[in-house]
Structures are given as structure tokens and as C-alpha cells.
Amino acid sequence: MTQASKFKVVNIATSSEDPKSSILLIYTGGTFGMVYDEEGALAPFNFSLVLEKIPELHKLDLKLTVISFPEPVDSSNINVEQWKDMASILKDNYHQYDGFVILHGTDTMAYSASAISFMLKGVNKPIIFTGAQIPIGATRSDARENLITALEIASERNGDHAMVTEVCLYFNYYLLKGNRAQKIRSSNFAAFESENYPYLAESGVEIVYNESFLKKYKEEELKYSPELDPDVAILKIFPNISPAVVKGILNIEGLKGVILESYGSGNTMNYDWFNELLEGAVNRGIVILNVSQCIGGSVIQGRYETSKKLTEIGVISGLDITTEAAVAKMMHLLGTEKSTEQVKKKLSIPIRGEMTI
């Protein structure tokens, strides 16, 4: 274990002397790791005691190591520094383990899964995000099933290689491609969906893999890119949005990129003032990526008159990318590419399977 000492490391004993797989479990925080204290309030629990809460882990034929953030982070507080911590842990320990499971709060899990997919190129092992809607300390918690199945998927082999070879998100019986997932429900165990990409696996009596859509194993060297530029904003349009609002966002000091959340298949208001503000931003070097407010479907700029002008201005079509993946991808490209033209070029094409051409 080469990660900095600020992270706590615990080795978990299993029932097997010769486990079939070694898994690193990374605990960042979130609802998953909460228990009720003596006063009945939810509080983070010592994750080294995970076997007390999920004794079934003893029965898994795994070598399991837990590494915890020094202080659990509510996913609403996740930022680029935590993304760098996660990516650094994965990079430092990549060759020591067969797979990785990251326990994370649900609110920003899709953002984090997307970010890690861009920060780590050449992944050919499972990196699976999971969490829970109900704390592990609650009787009806979904934490147990989500963790146990995520660990099983992370340890699954397909011949000489891992069955799953990319960043994914497992929740409520389904394995999703990490940078295609979105949280769409807050009060349901089925919190996540992947409207524009099929499920990678479904857990039932057996775990059934959708092998046609799994990323194929490829012998690659892992490349770590921690550079992220957070100077991006989301501009979500709505009926009667004012020029002052749009101008205020596009004139944020230091702004380099904007995710434009448009209607339907990429449509916006065809007002002169709106197009002029967008064109002015593009001319100042701000990169604008058009994504749909809909959870399914694709941006098709020019399909209607209301989006034709966007292409002329220089707004980039995000096709079927999610807002979560768009934010992470833009931060990544702005942080790693040397020119605005290269950023624009790579935003328009898939680089980690995050969009379909």
C-alpha cells in the first residue's frame, strides 16, 4: 500500500486461505456507512468494523482490504480534491489488486464515476462505485446487497481476465457504465438509470452479464491524469430566462467552459440577445457544450430551426452524453489539453465510451 498515511488501511480476514481474488474497498463516506448512535442520531461508523455489520463478507472467497478517507465525506461536499484522492488511491494500488469497489454517497456518485473514468485511461480491471439509500445501521438497508454484489462482480473472471474492465456503478440489482449513469430518484432503491446505454449486468438468482456491451479486455498501461480545471458552469435554460441571468453566467470571472442544458434534442430560444451572448462567449474562448435536459435521447443540433444557429455560433453538440459526464469530461479536457481547439475536438467524440456517435 503506497498511499499517503492520511488514509486508514484495514485488512479483512476471509474464510479462505487461498482467496480467488483480491479486492480493495475504498470508503469515502455517504449514507452507506451511517449507524444510529446511542441518542438515535445517524453518525459515521468505524469502517474497520464492517464485518460486524455484514458478516456475510466472511463467506466471500476474497482477500479484502479497506482503505478509508480520514473523515467520511457527504457526497454533496465532493469536489475535485476528493476525485484526485480516489484516482490517486486507485493508481497507487492498481497492480496489487484484482478489482476495486468504491463506497460513495448517491447524490454525486454519477459525477465521481464519470470523473474517475476520465482521470484513469487504460483501465482493464473493475472499478465499481456503489452505496445505499438507507444506512447500513438500518434494518431495511439496501447497503448489504449493493456491497456484496459489487464485490462479487469485481471478483468475477472471464477466462484469464476480469469480466468487467472499466469504471461502473452498481445499484439495486443493476450494473451501469459509470459515465452513462444518472441519479434520477431520491426516495427509491432504484436510484440510478442509464437511459442511453444498456445495463452491463443484472443481479438475480445469478448475475447475468450483458457481454455485448461490456468493454472488451485490452492490454494497456494505466495512465493517470489528475489535472482538472474546475472553471466550468452549467447554464440550464427555462421559459422566460432573462438576459441578465444568461449574461451573469457567461461573464463569470475565469470561466472556461459551459454545459448548456437545452430542451429536447438540443433546442434553445431563438432570440437574438441569447444567440449574441453565446456567440460573444465563444469568441472570448469559452467552450460551450450542448446537452439535453432529458435523461434519454440525443442532442441533434440543426434538426430544428431553434438549434441550427448554435452550430453556426460554434456550440458543440454533446450528443447523448449526460450532464454529469459532460461536467467531468470538460474539467478533464480543460485541465489536460494545451489548446481550446483540442478541447472542442475531444468534446465532440467519445474518449471513454461516454457518448455515442
Image: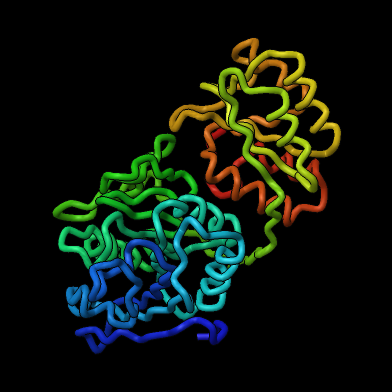
Q: Residue furthest front?
A: 39
Residue 225 position within the rendered picture, expressed as x and y whole percent measured from the top left: 66, 63
Instruction: State whether residue 79 is above or below residue 19.
Output: above
Q: Residue furthest right?
A: 284
Task: Locate the C terminus and report the quarter of the image it occupies.
Answer: top right
Q: Residue furthest top?
A: 305
Colouring of the image: rainbow
* Residue 261 image-quadrant placement: top right
In the displayed structure image, the side of residue 266 where residue 126 appears, left or right: left
Q: Decide if residue 42 is in sight here.
A: yes
* Residue 164 image-quadrant placement: bottom left
* Residue 207 image-quadrant placement: bottom left
Instruction: Work out whether residue 214 or residue 118 is closer to the camera in this orientation and state it.
Output: 118
Residue 332 position within the rendered picture, expressed as x and y whole percent measured from the top left: 66, 53
At 60% from the left and 14% from the top, the residue drawn is 303
Residue 89 position within the rendered picture, expressed as x and y whole percent measured from the top left: 53, 74
Instruction: Work out whether residue 197 or residue 340 is closer to the camera in this orientation and state it.
Output: 340
At 24% from the left and 89% from the top, the residue drawn is 17
Q: Decide if residue 161 is in sight here.
A: no
Instruction: Work out whether residue 209 or residue 183 is closer to the camera in this orientation and state it.
Output: 183
At 53% from the left and 68% from the top, the residue drawn is 86
In the displayed structure image, the side of residue 202 where residue 330 appears, left or right: right
Residue 268 position within the rendered picture, expressed as x and y whole percent measured from the top left: 62, 19
At 40% from the left and 59% from the top, the residue drawn is 105
In the displayed structure image, the side of residue 286 where residue 210 appears, left or right: left
Instruction: State whether residue 50 is above or below residue 197.
Output: below
